[in-house]
Image: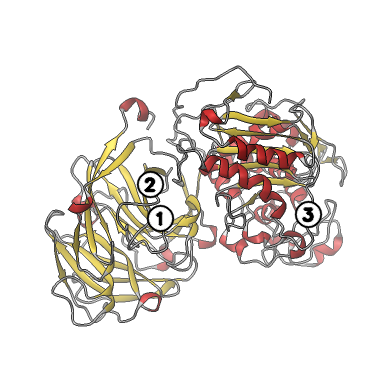
Amino acid sequence: MKRLLLTLLLGATQLGCGFISRSAAAEFPGKIWSVATPAELGLDETKLAQARDYALTAGGSGCIIYHGKLVMEWGDQAALYDLKSSSKAIGVTALGLALKDGLVHLDDPAKKYHPTFGTPPDANAQTDWLEKITLRNLATQTAGFEKPGGYEKLVFAPGTAWLYSDGGPNWLAECLTLAYHRDLNDVMFERVFTPIGVTPADLKWRKNAYRPEFIEGIKRREFGSGFSANVQAMARLGYLYLREGWWNGELILPHSFIEAVRTTSPEVKKLPVRDPELHGNASQHYGLLWWNNSDGTIAGLPRDAYWSWGLFDSFILVVPSLDLVATRAGKSWPRQAGGGHYDPLKPFFEPIAAAVKASAPASTAPLPPSPVIAEIQWAPKASILHLAKGSDNWPLTWADDGAMYTAYGDGNGFEPFVPHKLSMGFAKVLGDADAPQGINLPSPTFDTVGDGKKGRKACGILMVDGTLYALARNLANAQLAWSTDHGATWTWADWKFTESFGCPTFLNFGQNYGGARDHFVYIVSPDADTAYQRADRVVLARVPMDKVRDRGAYEFFVNTDANGNATWSSDIKQRGGIFTAAGQCYRLGFTYNAGLKRYLLCMTGAGNDTRFAGGFGVYDAPEPWGPWTTAFHTDSWDTGPGESSSLPTKWMSADGRTVHFVFSCNDSFSVRRGEIILRSPASNSAH
């Protein structure tokens, strides 16, 4: 392999809106990449060679970038390859630009931007479907256009099925052309390709092969196919996506767009696939014109991996959790009769992932490291307090009377136990973290009998202005209750969350909601209909604190703009994720650390039964919607982290550096002290 000599040493980049890339001090290439041998970065060179050799069974070229360095390349790096449908992933980058510029919105109807959208053929206009097709439908292959790239017939109503199409993405290209009223080739070179070091010699966009050359006097481009590029240009584009849309301190693509690209929305996952013999269960792992592994179809590849994919097996593979990009172009690999849709990819993708996993420094944390918190040091295992043995859950809030109120599940509460095991019971906790006292508070309007999934369970508790609010799960999906007499009696709302929010919890500030950031109450949940399903992302809602009981007053986080400001919608179907961790988003605890001015999110991690063994993470952010980073993460703690956990605000020190972790280890009210170690001022001055 040709060895390059130039090494670029880049420090941590200060980013104006507080967002950091996947690496705390990301390295970016100049005219060429910095180079390292696999051994220098702790990679298994034998496994990388295994992937390369498989790639070369069909010729072509490729390269692998790890931690911003070129660690392997093969074939002619300057040769241009017809990328076929990998063009979709390159072209959709223009959608990210248009979203950043505020020219379009994903859920706008396509006809808003294109007066003759969908016609010809005229038969499409005879349906009422054209008016309903959104830009999101075009980018997720759910619009209903047939496969070829010309003027294709609609075969189903938008959003009712998944069908791989070139025609739909080509309509998207036209919508964006008219939104900019410019040749998209000029836009892309000006805004994306040139800033990341891709020249016209590295990448070319052919004349439209399916439709007239011009639209309203502007060059008509296509997304379905049409790009030719070398593997180095492909790697640079993949690296832009890996770095969350940033390049050398410049935000090129918004984070919300990157999130939508690399994840599959719950609505798409529910759709049947047309031509499953060709595309398998594609609706389970397709984002915005990029494929992904969010459902774990490729067992040896992390679930956060996503990639472009074209005929002749051209790829841009991006794996955020491994900090890796790999590209390949050439001829098609052989297929086995009756084989799975993703099967030809496995001999290339899996050895690459295995080579990185063999590296000791590789982190399994789903989010980049915190710019503020270096680590959390936990008190010795022997110091953990265990109360209320046999009961779990324990959401907590700090009330006006100085007590913390909580709820337990599948047990008899604190000693002395209540006489009958409850699926959901209520209690309060007095005293300091070193010597807490739990007191059961029986309530006939709260107490519930049941077991496991069959019984109602509390997943969130909050006090605002003297009123207690509770969120309960296992109710298809979740339901709100409130008490104005400190839990003696409860009123249950006549509505439920019936889409997503299957295990919601409140954001807790100080005593009686003191020190809240504004007049809203915030709720987070894994984006799933049940507490027993690990989701791909975490979602966020808010409601005015005086309207918590009114379902019509709730708004749902959609995304952030280029300045990091949150956008909201009253339509739950428009919800976006505050962060994504494919297949890892599970039960949550959400509090504000006033001393550090950071939001802390506890999330149950790996393990088949985390009551006894497994992992968890503590994630931090400057705002409830992010950007979220990792303060602490482990896949195997020295004790069971429990099925739920939180860092209650009452038991945080004034400077925020001492916290107490409340968790349901071995079905008990467990408390463990933690000391937050901050990074040096030089490493977090940007924040």
- Which residue type carries mark 2? His
Image quarter (top left, top right, bottom left or bottom right) of the N terminus: top right
Q: Residue at x 79, y 63 (%)?
A: 154
| Disc assigned to residue 335 | 3
- Which residue type carries mark 1? Gly
- Which residue type carries mark 3? Arg
Return the disc, 2 or 3, that comes first in the chain's sequence.
Answer: 3
Of residue 181 and residue 64, the one placed in the foreground of this image is 64
- On the picture, is 81 further left or further right than 406? right
| Residue 11 in picture, x, y percent from top left | 46, 23
Which is in the foreground here, disc 2 or disc 3? 3
Of residue 607 and residue 152, the one placed in the foreground of this image is 607
- On the picture, is 288 further left or further right than 370? right
Which is in the foreground here, disc 3 or disc 1? 3
| Residue 538 in picture, x, y percent from top left | 45, 55
| Disc assigned to residue 633 | 2
The residue that label 1 is drawn on is 605
Quadrant in the rendering for residue 183: top right
Identify the element where label 1 is drawn. loop
| Residue 186 in picture, x, y percent from top left | 73, 31
Quadrant in the rendering for residue 421: bottom left
Identify the element where label 3 is drawn. loop
Measure how far apart labels 3 and 1 are at the Cα level: 37 Å
Identify the element where label 2 is drawn. strand
Q: Residues within 10 Å of mark 3 (few under 14, many from 20)?
A: few
| Residue 401 in picture, x, y percent from top left | 13, 61
Return the disc, 2 or 1, that comes first in the chain's sequence.
Answer: 1
Pointer 2 with pointer 1, Cβ within 8 A: yes
